[in-house]
Amino acid sequence: MFGLGVNKLGINVAADPVAVLFSNGEEGAWYDISDLSTLFQEDGTTPAVVGQEVGKVLDKSGNGNHLVQTTATNCPILQVENGRYYLDFDGGDGLQASAIDMTGTNQMTVCVGCKKDTNDTMAIAEFSLNVGGNQGTFRIASLSNVWRWTSRGDSTVNVNSTGTTYGAGSLSVLTGQASITGDTSSLRIDGALNNDSTADQGTGPYGNHTLNVGARNAGASIQLDGRIYGLVVRGASSTATEVDNLEDYMGRKTGVAV
């Protein structure tokens, strides 16, 4: 039995601003690349070390939605710069969590710290094998000189970054929020609202799909050439305070002022 306020990984959900997001049983995932105790090589048991492949990332939310890649050549590399750990994806890598059942919610909050090294079309995190071909999905991606947040019931709504050109080398904290039934979808960048939409997302809820990180379908296509410092997926709406705390956390992990 776990202690009061402690989840399955022994994290004090009352004290940690990210763990709090899952303290009421919210479905989702939390991947903390700075926590080396959660990272393993492609065999799933050997602890990861800087400069080598990472084939398993434990989910710290308590939901057990661990990321896995068993092919060494498709694993990102653990690296560190200025004391900040990240997974380095080379355009041929990808991790995947088994199907996550989000059918109990029409609300979504996703936050990631990332850097893109090219201007290619690249998936950072995608729920399902193809966001445009499945119902109840989302994606955070890079397209040319923009970041993009996508949410879909049975109608796809894309929200592209505006104003600043986010080309190769861009380092950002990205937060996507959406309500399928409420027809709201927004993209926040570095702690501020960048763009939003009230276009019809169709019928919810979100689905029961695999979560793909760094590529579509565990490395099959639109692979990321860049870095991921951390990722939080929460199948729920989040208050302004919760989002502020989450972005502050991710900014510290990424080295971005929010």
Image (cartoon, rainbow, N blue to C red):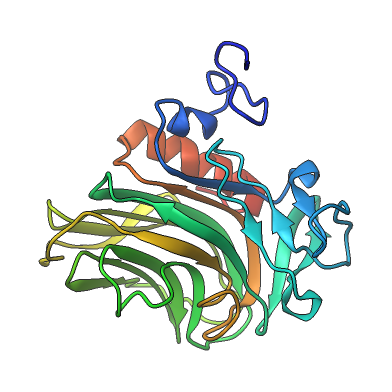
Does residue 176 sit above or below 242 in this rendering? below
Q: Nearer the viewer, residue 194 or 152?
A: 152
Quarter of the picture containing the N terminus is top right
How many numbered dots are placed on residues in this image?
A: 0
The location of residue 40, given as percent across then percent down, is: 80, 55
Residue 180 sits in which quadrant?
A: bottom left
Q: Nearer the viewer, residue 2 or 82?
A: 2
Residue 229 sits in which quadrant?
A: bottom right
The location of residue 176, given as percent across then percent down, is: 36, 57
Residue 153 sits in which quadrant?
A: bottom left
The residue under the point 48% across, 40% down is 246
Q: Is residue 86 left or right of residue 158?
A: right
- Is residue 83 visible in the rendered image? The answer is yes
Does residue 248 sit above or below 241 in this rendering? below
Does residue 89 sit above or below 91 in this rendering? above
The location of residue 73, given as percent across then percent down, is: 78, 80
Q: Is residue 113 left or right of residue 203?
A: right
The residue under the point 74% across, 43% down is 35
The residue under the point 84% across, 52% down is 45
The location of residue 41, given as percent across then percent down, is: 82, 61
- Is residue 173 visible in the rendered image? The answer is no
Q: Nearer the viewer, residue 191 or 86?
A: 86
Q: Is residue 173 left or right of residue 9?
A: left
The residue under the point 57% across, 26% down is 16
